[in-house]
């Protein structure tokens, strides 16, 4: 089938397995392996509606669209040494971490570039969505913030201004939220577990942006143990918020650590939460209200949840 008739561009390749902090760390290669096995067993790798996109490394210039040059050089040096920490606790260096993180960023950009060529309706990088990294530091398993790089690339090279970022990860997307807290053209809808109980301890409902950006940020806080019923209540607020504007690009971070039985979080959602948001965004995208739609995998450390929910997202995107 000709690529012009594809529906979903999906980044797929062993290069994504390299973003792994080792077998004893929850962010390891088994996550992508579980997802790849699931989509292969479902026959999705040969589905004629899916265009497989090879991972690529981002260039240093691309990474520096968002990140500080000194920090990028720090990661490169730590990658050669291969020991120590990139932050103050949970993001260790390993040999080749610079290249692995560059593959995450480059793969998100490859998905976006394919989307902008109008070869596909939707794009997905399952290893993307590293929302904790800040412009000048690593944080929360995130070395480079591919979301920030994507936003800057979309603006500086494609002229897109008003962008919508939706985050379903159990952890608050603090890197994106605070680095764009005064940006009136980046609208954020962030569902997450209450920061009083979970890293990074931020993202409260009174945080709505600063200066000209007041009212462009929406934190939707869920109590530990929250169910789909409580998600649905918050979803109504999200729909009202999103529907007030039109956007030129929409980024969905579909972290599945908000699904029940994740080992490091405390929410009790099911795939319903992710699929309901996806359905809403697909409908708006089809009406050209929110621009092109790109999905990034984000967190999630229960392998069964990764395999189930992300596979269901792929099926929903292609209408299966």
Image (cartoon, rainbow, N blue to C red):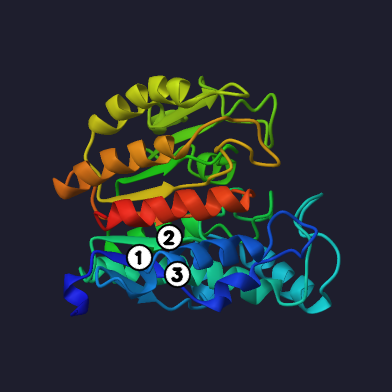
Residue furthest to the right: 84
Do residues under tags 2 and 1 come within 8 Å of each other at their CB atoms? yes
In-front residue for pair 132/214: 132
Estimate the x, y position of residue 299 in percent, counting from the top left: 58, 49
Mark sitting earlier along the chain (2/1): 1
Q: How many residues crowd around disc 3 within 10 Å: few (fewer than 14), some, or many (20 or more)?
A: some
Mark 2 to mark 1 CA distance (whole Å) = 8 Å
Estimate the x, y position of residue 283 in percent, counting from the top left: 20, 42
Q: Is residue 9 visible?
A: yes
Mark sitting earlier along the chain (3/2): 3
**What residue sits 41% from the left and 27% below the top?**
214
Provide the residue designation for mark 1: 112
Q: Which of label 2 and label 1 is nearer to you?
A: 1
Provide the residue designation for mark 3: 40
The disc at residue 150 is 2
Quadrant in the picture for the N terminus: bottom left
**Residue 310 sits above or below residue 198 on the image:** below
Estimate the x, y position of residue 294 in percent, counting from the top left: 35, 56
Mark 1 to mark 3 CA distance (whole Å) = 23 Å
In what element is the residue under mark 3?
A: helix
**What residue sits 55% from the left and 47% below the top?**
305
Mark sitting earlier along the chain (1/3): 3
């Amino acid at each position: 089938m000709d690529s012009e008739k594809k529906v979903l561009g999906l980044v797929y390749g062993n290069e994504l397995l390299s973003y792994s902090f080792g077998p004893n760390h929850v962010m390891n290669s088994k996550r992508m392996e579980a997802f790849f096995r699931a989509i292969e067993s479902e026959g999705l790798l040969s589905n004629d509606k899916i265009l497989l996109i090879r991972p690529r490394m981002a260039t240093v210039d691309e990474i520096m669209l968002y990140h500080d040059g000194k920090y990028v050089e720090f990661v490169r040096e730590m990658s050669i040494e291969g020991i120590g920490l990139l932050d103050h606790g949970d993001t260790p260096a390993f040999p080749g971490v610079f290249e692995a993180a560059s593959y995450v960023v480059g793969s998100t950009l490859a998905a976006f570039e394919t989307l902008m060529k109008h070869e596909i309706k939707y794009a997905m990088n399952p290893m993307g969505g590293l929302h904790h990294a800040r412009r000048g530091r690593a944080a929360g398993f995130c070395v480079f913030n591919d979301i920030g790089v994507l936003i800057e690339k979309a603006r500086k090279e494609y002229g897109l201004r008003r962008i919508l970022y939706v985050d379903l990860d159990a952890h608050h997307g603090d890197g994106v939220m605070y680095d764009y807290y005064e940006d009136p053209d980046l609208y954020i809808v962030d569902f997450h577990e209450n920061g009083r109980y979970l890293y990074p301890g931020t993202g409260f409902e009174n945080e709505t942006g600063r200066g000209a950006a007041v009212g462009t940020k929406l934190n939707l806080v869920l109590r530990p143990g929250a169910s789909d019923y409580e998600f649905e209540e918050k979803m109504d607020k999200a729909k009202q918020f999103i529907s007030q504007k039109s956007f030129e690009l929409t980024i969905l971070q579909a972290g599945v650590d908000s699904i029940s039985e994740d080992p490091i979080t405390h929410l009790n959602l099911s795939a319903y939460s992710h699929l309901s948001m996806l359905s809403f965004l697909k409908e708006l995208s089809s009406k050209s209200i929110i621009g092109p739609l790109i999905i990034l995998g984000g967190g999630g450390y229960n392998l069964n949840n990764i395999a189930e929910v992300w596979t269901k997202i792929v099926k929903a995107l292609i209408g299966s």
